[in-house]
Amino acid sequence: MGNLTLRIEDKYQLDRRLGGGSFGEVYQGHDLKTGQEVALKLEYVQIDPSLLENEIEIYEKLSGGPGIPRVYWHGEECEFRVMAFELLGPNLENLFNYCGRKFSLKTVLLLADQIIPGFQYIHSEGYIHRDVKPDNLLMGDGKQGNKVYITDIGLAKEIEERDWHSYPVVGTVRYASINAHLGKEQSPRDDMESLGYVLLYFLRGSLPWQSLKAESGAQKEKLILERKQSAEAHGLFRDLPEEFKKYFEHVRSLRSGEKPNYVYLRRLFRNLFRRKGYEYDYVFDWTELKFLEYLERSRKRSEDGECTPYINA
């Protein structure tokens, strides 16, 4: 994207690249009239079928739901399709690395309490995400900094009742459900199983099927599936509260097309949260870490004789 125009339709200015991959590039920019900061996702117009058009259509249908970023505008500029949407903060994979690749139980439960109703809403509107992973779960920006958003829904599709086709694994193999590995049509239970793997990844620091060696991609997928099918024997729930095992027991007991009991799943974790005596204060691990880093910088400034600015907490 070397000859990329810096302006989109004289509406938005591109300021800096935030990231990208096989599905497009994402930039931070601003509205030329209001100055409002936005995120801009670009995809080459020759890509067919367009994942960005699918994403725009779904975002607009889900607009206003919990954890769904707002789309401000979409159109074309030169050789790109463009979506301007709500600027968000860091994704959970970045924050996971920032926190030393381990989240506390409190942080995981705070996240789960927001993410479960987010997927409940997506499913209630007739869609499944199909690529649930930490990179696609972002914290908000500014005043929305304690809110979790579900993003990158370009692979999402409408829920289908039939379960007789065979499909390749869609999404990210590390977090894919067992049914996805088996080539079955995905349904809401599969999003929730993937979310369960994400939560365990945050608590454990890794999953039992990471770093498996294989001669080919197909062989590795087979080994990962086998490890997932016997995950408990490989310590997936070892030393963790029983609620996580109960979560998986419920999700995996569901038949194709049967909706998860989201209230039950959320209550499982809320009861655990209360039992541990945690306070629902939106203080995540990275919140504490940033505050401790601020105190350390303040201490060094004081030792160097610098004035420490007053922060209204």
Image (tube, helix red, strand yellow):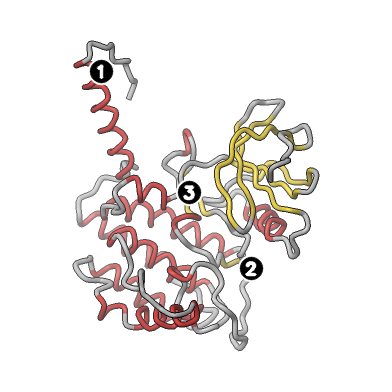
- Label 2 and label 1: CA atoms lie apart by 53 Å
Name the residue beneath numbered marker 1.
Answer: 301
Mark 1 or 3, nearer chain start: 3
Name the residue beneath numbered marker 3.
Answer: 138
- Callout 3, which amino acid? Leu
Q: Is 117 placed above or below 34 here?
A: below
Taking the image as shown, residue 187 lies to the left or right of residue 301, namely right
* Classed neighbour count for the residue bearing mark 2: other residues with Cα under 10 Å, few (<14), some (14–19), many (≥20): some
Residue 157: mark in rendering: 2
Give the label, 2 or 1, closer to the camera. 1
Secondary structure at numbered mark 3: strand
Q: Position of residue 193 (x, y in %)?
A: 43, 71
Q: Residue at x 25, y 33 (%)?
A: 292
> Looking at the rendering, which quadrant does residue 134 occupy?
bottom left
Q: Is 164 placed above or below 94 here?
A: below
| Nearest to the observer: residue 310 or residue 268 | 310
| Nearest to the observer: residue 18 or residue 247 | 18
Q: Position of residue 245 (x, y in %)?
A: 29, 73
Residue extending farthest bottom: 164
Secondary structure at numbered mark 2: strand
Q: Position of residue 271 (x, y in %)?
A: 27, 60
- Callout 2, which amino acid? Lys
| Nearest to the observer: residue 4 or residue 74 | 4
Q: Residue at x 29, y 52 (%)?
A: 103
* Classed neighbour count for the residue bearing mark 3: other residues with Cα under 10 Å, few (<14), some (14–19), many (≥20): many
